[in-house]
Amino acid sequence: MKLSAKQEAAFGIGAVGKDMVYALSSSYVMYYYQDIIGLSASFVGLILMIARIFDAVNDPFMGVLVAKTKTKWGKFRPWLISGTVLNAFVLYALFNAPHKEGAAMMAFFSIIYILWGMTYTMMDIPYWSMIPAITDTPADTENLSVIGRTCAGVGSALIAMGTMLSVSLLGGGSERTGFARVALIVSVLFIVTEIICAVSVREREYSGMETASVKDMFKALFSNDQALVVVLAIVLINSALYLTSNLIIYFFKYDFGRANPGTDWTVSYTLFSTVGGAFQILGMMIVYPILRRKLQNTQIFKTALCMSMAGYIIILALCFTGMSGNLPLLLVPGALVFAANGILSVLTTVFLSNSVDYGQLKTGHRDESVIFSMQTFVVKAASGVSVFAAGLGLDLIGLVGNSDQEGPVAVQSSSTLMGLRLLMTILPVILLAAAMIFFIRRFKLTDKVVEENAAKLKRQR
């Protein structure tokens, strides 16, 4: 089924809104509840970890529900719309915390964040499951994956570029108020973009999806070895990414800000994020297509991992040579890391889509929702694990937040700043190196194999 330009654009618009929501939560929930609200970083990280464990049960069941859904609007759109509306309300509540203290605030955060994960799953699994369900050729699958991931990168970049400046402009001197208003705007945009997507994009009349019991669903998860390889790679890569995205704001506020007294750290942070977001989009839209002309996807994947690791090592070198306050120099490795992440996000989606064909040939079942429920779970799991590590690390290094206080930024000790630098560079390098080793040893869906699998399925049909 050939997709129209209108459908491709609508799918991309949906990705923009979806990832604006996810980026706001994954990048700023730790900062909001630890630095502004005043909860312990370890407690915040622990709740995020618990929420991900809950998702381990919730996500697969969501995949089964989607697979069993039969309506005149299709399998995916009813969940896409209902999940979006619910998640938008919960997102606003997440960043509009009541003025409570102690156990009451801890209870509020625990409940509202678990609800956020549940409602996000309701719309995220159907969204990505539509890729192999609305097109049946490798080229179209890859193209739609690129569109989705590129536009998701745009959504993430918009949040990275505009959040802190918007918080400052809309908050009237209060970050707490600013975050609430930013979350309200993002929630409204989220609903609008997903309605556009749902109205315009439809799966094929017969998508080949099989309904499955919970038992069959778990069997499908572990019988597709290539999907599991991609899943583990996603866990490692996203853990590295979320460690950085949660810690970089502390780096600019307390480390970069100390090296540049009298300057507004939020401006430098926004500029760094803007450049990084631009390079992430360039990685998806320009660098990846250029490399794709000459290289196989597996080769591009390994190249991007090396780019990202090099960027982290350069950042650490700048810190050790006393140049952590030099923004132009920091932009260079930042561009490497962000561009590499853009490429990797496209490729992991392509690989996961390709694993659906592989799994169908191997098991006789076509399990889009099951496979993509794995992606949703592991991305959130990576976020939970990395934020828990970041929260624990922040407490271990003794970082003291401002807790929404006006006036000078809290001064951190030299040992605290050194610990912060190591947390946001060394740990990501270790995770990316592990992803490289595992991928080289286990992944076998090369371009040739993917084409052969598609041809076999076409003959079967």
Image (tube, rainbow, N blue to C red):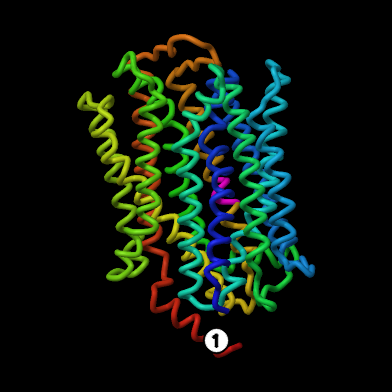
Looking at the picture, does residue 118 appear above or below residue 443?
A: above
* Kind of residue at badge 1: Lys
Q: Position of residue 365 (x, y in %)?
A: 64, 75
Residue 80 picture quarter = bottom right
| Main secondary structure type of the part rendered in magenta | helix
**How many C-alpha atoms fall within 10 Å of the one at disc 1: few (<14), some, or many (≥20)?**
few
- Residue bearing the label numbered 1: 458
Residue 97 picture quarter = top right
- Secondary structure of the residue carrying tag 1 is helix
Residue 378 in the magenta stretch? The answer is: yes
Residue at image position (58%, 48%) is 17
Looking at the picture, does residue 14 appear above or below residue 224?
A: above
Q: Position of residue 388 (x, y in %)?
A: 53, 34
Residue 126 in the magenta stretch? The answer is: no
**Magenta residues (range):** 377-381
Residue at image position (47%, 65%) is 350
Tell me the quarter of the image containing the C terminus: bottom right
Residue at image position (65%, 71%) is 203
Q: Position of residue 194 (x, y in %)?
A: 64, 54
Q: Position of residue 85 (x, y in %)?
A: 72, 47
Numbered circles on residues, count: 1
Toward the left, the furthest residue is 321
Residue nearer the viewer, 197 or 55: 197
Residue 449 is left or right of residue 335, and the answer is right
Residue 193 is left or right of residue 231, and the answer is right
Residue at image position (64%, 63%) is 370
Residue 431 is left or right of residue 457, and the answer is left
Residue 172 is left or right of residue 66, and the answer is left
Tell me the quarter of the image containing the N terminus: bottom right
Residue nearer the viewer, 44 or 254: 254
Residue nearer the viewer, 30 or 274: 274
